[in-house]
Structure formats: C-alpha cells, structure tokens
Amino acid sequence: MLLCVRCNAMMPSWPTSATALRVPELDFIPLGELPEGVPVATNGGDNAESMAEHALAMALATAKRLIVEHESLKHGQFNQFTQNRMLAGGVCGIFGFGGIGAATARLMHCIGMRVHAINRHGRTDERVDWIGTPERLNELLEAADVLLISAPLTRATYGLIGAAELRRMKDDAILVNVAREEIVQERPLYDHLVRNPRFTACIDAWWIEPVRHGEFRIDQPFLDLPNVIASPHNSAQGGGSHDISLRRAVENCRRALTGEAPLHVIGLWLNVRFRRRRLPVKWETHARPQSGVRPQQAINTQLVDALARYTPDWPIESSVHCRRAPATLNC
C-alpha cells in the first residue's frame, strides 16, 4: 500500500501490487501511470466540514453584503436601509456531491435552502431535494441561487464552466468554488462578472497557486471587482480539520490492510473485492531530517505519526519516516 498525501511530481516508480492509494486530490496523481489492477481510493471528505463552513460563510457574506457595507462604512456611508438577501427558500446547487458537497448541503438545509445536487450516479443517501447526473448540469445552473463547485478536477470537469454555462445562471447568482478553479474558465468568468454586477464569484481555489505551481498569479484583475470575494485556498484550514482528515485516512488504510473494501474507491476498480487475509507488515525506516524538511515531508511524517497514534498495535515508529515494503495483499 502506498500512502500519498500529496504528489506534485511524477513518482520515480509506482508499486506493482499496491492495495490502495490514499490521495486527497486526484489531479496530483498521474493515474495513467499506475499498473493495471491497482485500486485507487481517495481521502473522500477529508476536510469536508471545514470547507462546508467556508462555503457557507462566503455565500452569507455575499447575500448580506458584509464586505460591501464594510467598505461603505470606511467612507462614511451608513446604508442602513439598503436591502440585502435572504438565502432561506432559495436553491443551493452543488456540483460534485461527495463529502464536501454533502457537508455543505447539511448546513444549507439548516438555513432553509433547498439542495439540488449532481454526482456521477444521480443518487445519494443524503438529504437532497433534487439530484442528477453531470448530463443534467444545465438544469442545476438554471435553478441555483448559490452554486457550489466541489467536484474533483478531471478530464471531464476541466473547463466545464464557461461563458455559455455562466449565461444560464441567474443574474444575481452566487458562485462558490472550493474545489479547483480550472473547472471554471478564467476569462469567461471575469467577463461575466464585469457584465453582470449582481452576479458574485466567491473564489477560494485559484488557477495558479503556490502549492501546485510555485507562485500565485491571476491573469484577470478579479480582486479589483466589487462582486468578488476571495480567500487564499484556505477553506480546509479550520482548526482541528487536519486531525479529522488524518483519522479518516488512517481508518481507510486500516480497512485496506485488514481485508475490508476501502471507502471512496474510484475509476476502474469500484467493484474490486478485497480478500480477507492476515498481512505481515514490514517497514523500511529512514531517519527524519532535523532541518530543511520540506512541507511534503512534514505532511508525510504527520500521517505516519497518526498511524502510530491511532493504531497503536501496528509496528510503526512515530519518530521515523516509513515506507511500506512490497504489499502482500492481492485483489
């Protein structure tokens, strides 16, 4: 089994018989390079609650004109009787109804919004008022007062929201993106915001970001527009959310190692059955560097420490980097 928190570059070699690959964001992983038959499981919903709160906060800040009126007050304008919006009774459309989408839906229901959602299968056990498959995206766009983008970045979703899709949305709709900004085309979004000042974009994920690209850059002056609310892709940084994420990752790893089917399996391996068998666990250990530790190494160390902390019966030393020896579980 390969535990991968974030892969920014091609790995030198892939395991040939891995049990599962634990990743939070699929676009970091060159799935086409994986050997045939390797099941892939994501850390679905790892920071869902934190990101859901962030999405709700952005939508409410827009509806209640909080940032606009803050700026007005700085200039001496006391707009007490300027009308703001109620979100209760409106429709929250969620494109990408996984863990983040479901967590957001629960919050939106609490403030009285109806939830329309899209996922790959067009069905869910979560409470929704309407659900469809990606082929019904236009229906979602036309109905949404708030549209949340929480889908993974794939070949199918890359650039999916362009000028034509934006024109289908309501003039005063609120677009919230906490997923990957490449799902929304940059220039068409900027042009739509300029032409439709009642339309608002709440942008947490950006096209060029430091973690993935080494720098933050935008090619359009979004931050100069009054109908944009921006954050530095920090929706997952709620206090305690990282610990929750690690717990979920460790639990799914435990399922794989003990022969249970991992959760959130994707791609061609959705129906893989894991045979239950005992696994001899072998680890290769590498001393943790005392200085010059890259962020990725620190994240990997935290995951290993979590394995030791949450599964004390496993032979893992929390003070070292660990790399799993070739897996013995076949599927």
Image: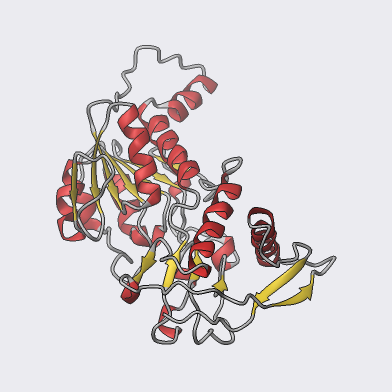
Q: Nearer the viewer, residue 251 or 287?
A: 251
Residue depicted at x 75% and y 65%: 317
Query: Looking at the picture, how far across and down is residue 183, in whole percent?
Result: 35, 60
Reply above or below: 132 against 103. Answer: below
Q: Is residue 153 visible?
A: no
Q: x, y percentage for residue 194?
A: 32, 45
Q: With 308 as the anchor, is 35 left or right in this view?
A: left
> What residue is at 16 percent from the left and 60 percent from the top?
135
Left or right relative to 327: residue 39: left
Quarter of the figure with the C terminus: bottom left
Is residue 191 visible in the rendered image? The answer is yes
Which residue is at the front of the view, 40 or 198?
Answer: 40
- Quadrant in the rendering for residue 80: top left
Q: Judge from the rendering whether residue 255 lies leftward or rightward of residue 171; answer left or right.
A: right
Instruction: Please state which of residues 13 and 81 is positioned toward the viewer in this rendering.
Output: 13
Task: Where is residue 122? Give x, y as percent.
Answer: 19, 55
Picture residue at 56% right of the left edge, 47% below the top: 244
* Observer-nearest of 33 and 280: 280
Q: Is residue 14 above or below residue 49?
A: below
**Residue 299: x and y, percent?**
65, 61
For the N terminus, give its image quadrant.
Answer: bottom right
Which quadrant of the figure has residue 312? bottom right
Counting labels gives 0
**Above/below status of 96 relative to 176:** below
